[in-house]
């Protein structure tokens, strides 16, 4: 009879431990991890941004390093867009 009670107690204890362990999550917190830009904008992991510090600028990607989000420098300078202007002379008037 004592053996049955001991086994029942052990089974209930193991079940309680399993429930507690199942409810504790080792994953990331509910929110997504983001990097913050100097202007306060949030960037998701993998997104890139132009970082400007004084007169220095560089392209960086938001990454995870040792469980902390950080900016990883990809290249010096930031990409810029330009518009090529072509001047076409007007057609002669007949």
Image (cartoon, rainbow, N blue to C red):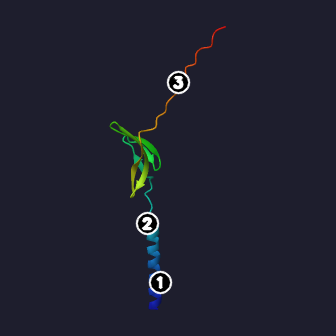
Label 2 or label 1, whichever lies nearer to me, is 2
Q: Residue furthest bottom?
A: 1
Q: Secondary structure at mark 2?
A: loop
Q: Which residue is mark 3?
A: 85
Tag of residue 25:
none
**Number of marks drawn:** 3
First of labels 1, 3 by sequence position: 1
**Quarter that holds the C terminus:** top right
Residue 89 x %, y %:
58, 16
Q: Residue at x 36, y 41 (%)?
A: 38
Q: CA distance from mark 1 to mark 3?
A: 85 Å
State whether residue 3 is above or below residue 11: below
State whether residue 78 is above or below residue 69: above
Q: Residue at x 45, y 66 (%)?
A: 23
Residue 31 x %, y %:
44, 53
Q: Secondary structure at mark 1?
A: helix
Q: Secondary structure at mark 3?
A: loop
Q: CA distance from mark 2 to mark 1?
A: 25 Å
Dividing the picture into quadrants, the one containing residue 5 is: bottom left
Badge 3: few (under 14), some or many (20 or more) residues near its Cα, within 10 Å? few
Task: Name the residue nearer the viewer: 53 or 8.
Answer: 53
First of labels 2, 1 by sequence position: 1
Badge 2: few (under 14), some or many (20 or more) residues near its Cα, within 10 Å? few
Q: Residue at x 43, y 64 (%)?
A: 26
Residue 65 x %, y %:
40, 56
First of labels 2, 3 by sequence position: 2
Label 2 or label 3, whichever lies nearer to me, is 3
Tag of residue 8:
1
Q: Which residue is mark 2?
A: 24
Task: Name the residue nearer the viewer: 26 or 62.
Answer: 62
């Amino acid at each position: 009879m004592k053996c049955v009670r001991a086994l029942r107690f052990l089974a209930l204890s193991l079940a309680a431990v399993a429930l507690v362990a199942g409810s504790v999550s080792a994953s990331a917190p509910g929110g997504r991890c983001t990097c913050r830009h100097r202007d306060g904008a949030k960037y998701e992991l993998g997104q890139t941004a132009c970082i400007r510090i004084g007169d220095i600028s560089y392209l960086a990607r938001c990454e995870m390093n040792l469980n902390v989000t950080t900016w990883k420098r990809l290249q010096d300078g930031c990409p810029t867009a330009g518009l090529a202007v072509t001047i076409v002379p007007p057609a002669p008037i007949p």
